[in-house]
Image: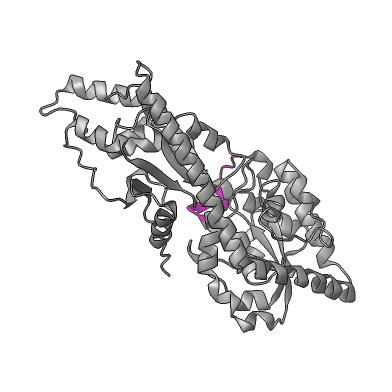
């Protein structure tokens, strides 16, 4: 399926009510390649690298540059390497008939200032020291602090909330979702396990070790670029011992777009979704459409995410299940201990006596129904958009003040260089 998001950023452009914005984002959406960082919305084409420096710099300094990085977690270090400059400008020239000495000088300069440019490198050196806006969707972030240290001005908003309302909009009218015929306790989507998702391998092993696999509708993919048995763990606490995980789960053949849709049958035949979020072993708060899918479908959930993520949800008006489910796992800082606490609660639920289990799920569904109503409400949509507008306006004010200081007091630290 296609995931049409360009219109979202055109919508945000209109919400901002500024005619002098230039919006850059990754296309195709979800890409992390610096060469895929492209212009979304602009009135003037200023990307001609052969214009005179003065003309290009004047155009940029009069415009408000926005980088959209709101769908994936920020990764500052990924764009601080001189290799990024090489990928963008393999034959970069600042003059015609440039000799090897000048070329080596340019490369040396790139190595020294890449840390102070990062995403701004798509404009070569023109945005050095120039404040730009960074639209993102994470809180409690050391990566964000690194960007702020080099003149990126934060614009936080929960973009996945608006995106998920579009992707899962039919769930509001899907009468089949209420026709439940549960066959298993837990619905668990477990596709990719590389990178920040490596904890999912340990989760799968713990499901087997706790003898919970028969209670779960859960797939598993033995390969994510490489076989899981060859995976080198960044966090050794997640190191797995089992070599037979694929024998306990059906083979997951879903692609990366699967989370942009929902399967009615999956929700009809399970009682509770255990949501495996993108970030788990991390300090950041960054929730995606993964947690919003069960909410849109009126399904109870346990959230496998970074510490404090349930509180993050409650701050947006959603209810969690702390009076029924032991949600103290959300307060545990250590990721392996948090994961083990979640599995222990799953084990408790799975082994409840039949009548007690029915009463347990009935209690969860009234909260899930409230959350579904909240998800599709105008109030929540307005909260998301108003939050963006407020943060954008504050960022514009901060950006303008920095620009005034930058040009009012020129010195060796503030004058942009080439």
Q: What stretch is highlighted in magenta?
A: 224-234
Give the residue drawn at x 48%, y 40%: 395
Q: Where is residue 65 in the image (x, y as percent from the top left)?
A: 36, 42
Q: Quadrant of residue 174?
A: bottom right
Q: Is residue 17 above or below residue 282?
A: below
- In this rendering, the answer to whether 166 lies above or below 43 is below
In-front residue for pair 376/382: 382
Q: Which quadrant would the C terminus be assigned to in this image? A: top left
Q: How is the image coloured?
A: one colour
Query: Which image quadrant is residue 354 in?
Result: bottom right
Residue at the (57%, 60%) spot, across then down: 382
Q: Residue at x 53, y 56 (%)?
A: 385
The percent position of residue 106, horizontal first and vertical second, equals 26, 24
How many numbered discs sit on the rendered protein? Answer: 0
Towards the viewer: 84 or 173: 173
**Left or right of 167: which side holds 108?**
left
Residue 245 visible in the shown view: yes
The quarter of the picture where the N terminus appears is bottom left
Was residue 230 drawn as part of the magenta stretch in this picture?
yes
Can residue 75 be seen in this snapshot?
Answer: no
Q: In the displayed structure, would residue 209 be above or below residue 66?
A: below
Q: Is residue 120 left or right of residue 298?
A: left
């Amino acid at each position: 399926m296609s995931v049409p998001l360009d219109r979202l950023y055109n919508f945000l452009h209109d919400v901002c009510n500024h005619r002098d914005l230039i919006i850059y984002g990754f296309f195709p959406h979800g890409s992390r390649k610096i060469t895929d960082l492209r212009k979304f919305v602009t009135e003037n084409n200023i990307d001609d690298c052969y214009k005179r420096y003065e003309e290009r710099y004047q155009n940029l300094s009069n415009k408000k540059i926005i980088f959209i990085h709101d769908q994936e977690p920020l990764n500052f270090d990924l764009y601080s390497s001189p290799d990024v400059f090489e990928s963008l400008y393999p034959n970069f020239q600042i003059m015609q008939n440039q000799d090897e000495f000048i070329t080596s000088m340019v490369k040396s300069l790139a190595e020294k200032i890449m840390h102070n440019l990062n995403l701004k490198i798509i404009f070569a050196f023109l945005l050095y020291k120039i404040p730009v806006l960074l639209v993102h969707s994470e809180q409690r972030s050391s990566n964000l602090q690194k960007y702020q240290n080099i003149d990126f001005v934060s614009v936080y908003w929960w973009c996945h909330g608006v995106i998920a309302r579009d992707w899962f909009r039919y769930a509001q009218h899907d009468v089949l979702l209420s026709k439940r015929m549960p066959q298993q306790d837990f619905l668990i989507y477990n596709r990719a396990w590389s990178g920040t998702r490596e904890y999912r391998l340990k989760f799968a092993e713990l499901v087997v070790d706790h003898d919970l696999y028969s209670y779960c509708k859960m797939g598993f993919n033995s390969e994510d670029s490489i076989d899981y048995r060859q995976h080198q763990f960044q966090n050794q606490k997640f190191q797995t011992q089992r070599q037979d995980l694929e024998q306990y789960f059906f083979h997951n053949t879903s692609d990366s777009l699967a989370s942009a849709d929902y399967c009615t049958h999956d929700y009809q035949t399970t009682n509770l979704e255990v949501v495996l979020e993108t970030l788990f072993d991390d300090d950041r708060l960054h929730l995606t459409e993964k947690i919003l899918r069960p909410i849109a479908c009126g399904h109870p959930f346990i959230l496998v995410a970074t510490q404090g993520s349930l509180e993050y949800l409650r701050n947006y008006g959603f209810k969690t299940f702390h009076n029924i489910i032991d949600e103290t796992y959300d307060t545990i800082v250590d990721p392996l201990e948090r994961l083990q606490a979640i599995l222990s609660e799953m084990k408790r639920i799975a082994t409840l006596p039949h009548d007690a289990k029915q009463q347990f799920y009935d209690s969860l569904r009234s909260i899930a129904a409230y959350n579904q109503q909240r998800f599709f409400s105008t109030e929540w949509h307005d909260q998301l958009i108003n939050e963006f507008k407020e943060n954008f306006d504050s960022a514009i004010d901060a950006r303008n003040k920095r620009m005034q200081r930058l040009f009012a007091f020129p010195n060796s630290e503030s004058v942009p260089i080439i």
